[in-house]
Amino acid sequence: KNEVEQSPQNLTAQEGEFITINCSYSVGISALHWLQQHPGGGIVSLFMLSSGKKKHGRLIATINIQEKHSSLHITASHPRDSAVYICAVIYSGAGSYQLTFGKGTKLSVIP
Amino acid sequence: DGGITQSPKYLFRKEGQNVTLSCEQNLNHDAMYWYRQDPGQGLRLIYYSQIVNDFQKGDIAEGYSVSREKKESFPLTVTSAQKNPTAFYLCASSTFNGYTFGSGTRLTVV
């Protein structure tokens, strides 16, 4: 079964720190998503990427297709960044746009 | 604003009762999905629909049913056959451009 692995599972940071969350997957993909889930449960899509790098505000997402690896970086972290960050991929040849999800990384940013 | 509306946010039901979770979108997306989330696990696909009047089983469809009579609506029924229905349920829709998720329904069966 195709897997999506995220690390770390839990991450605690001091406000202002630079944060990196990693995601690796097992076979070829057509796209990778980074998602944010707040304590209330709703999910927001942060990035969708298939190559290279994307930046939005203090968030940066990169992907290395050859190494089957993606990273999500948060610069100048803030307590409001505290959430679960989820990596999800669409495997090449998957029906529709079906996502396979990682288990998430729980980030806590302390003031 | 376009988006997905899931209702209710919290739902309590007695064991043995069927319950229907609502999902409505005004994004004009063709594809819609239902996912289940349990503590410590990734989201798992229950059912998906790529077009009106058509839907497909996902990885954990047993004990669930869906309908897609309108493009905007994709309700999920949790039947009494679902052995462990207490969970967080998320609805989503998509185009080639990306996904939009609802805010979820937390179902507790007592």
Image: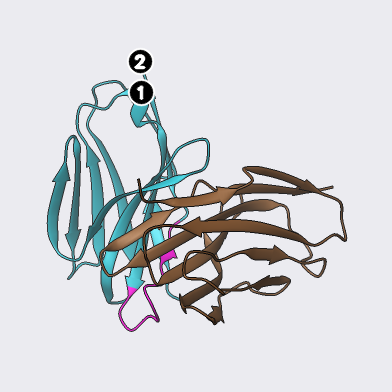
Residue furthest top in the image: A111
Q: Earlier in the sequence, mark 2 or mark 1?
A: 1
Q: Is A93 inside the magenta-drawn segment?
A: yes
Residue B26 locus on image (x, y percent): 41, 57
**Location of mark 2 (residue):** A111
Name the residue located 44 percent from the left edge and 49 percent from the top edge: A104
- Magenta range is A91-102
- Give the brown chain's letter: B
Please state which of residues A78 and B92 is positioned toward the viewer in this rendering: B92
- Let me know if residue A96 appears in the view: yes
Relative placement, left or right, of A67 versus A106 is: left
Q: Magenta part mainly helix, strand or loop?
A: loop
The C terminus of chain A lies in quadrant: top left
Q: Is residue A86 above or below residue B70?
A: above
The tint of chain A in the picture is: cyan
Is B70 left, or right, of B76 in this rendering? left
Identify whether B54 is placed above or below A65: below
In front here: A108 or B110? Answer: B110
A91 left or right of B87 in image: left
- Helix, strand or loop at label 2? It is loop
What crowding class fits label 1: few (fewer than 14 Cα within 10 Å), some (14-19), or many (20 or more)?
some
Query: What x and y, as percent, mark residue B38?
Result: 61, 53
Q: Residue at x 61, y 64 (%)?
A: B75
Residue A75 belongs to magenta span: no
The numbered disc on residue A79 is 1
Amino acid under disc 1: Pro
Q: Are marks 2 and 1 in contact (CB under 8 Å)?
A: yes
Left or right for A19, reference B109: left
Q: Which mark is residue A89?
A: none
Where is residue B57? Give x, y as percent: 58, 79
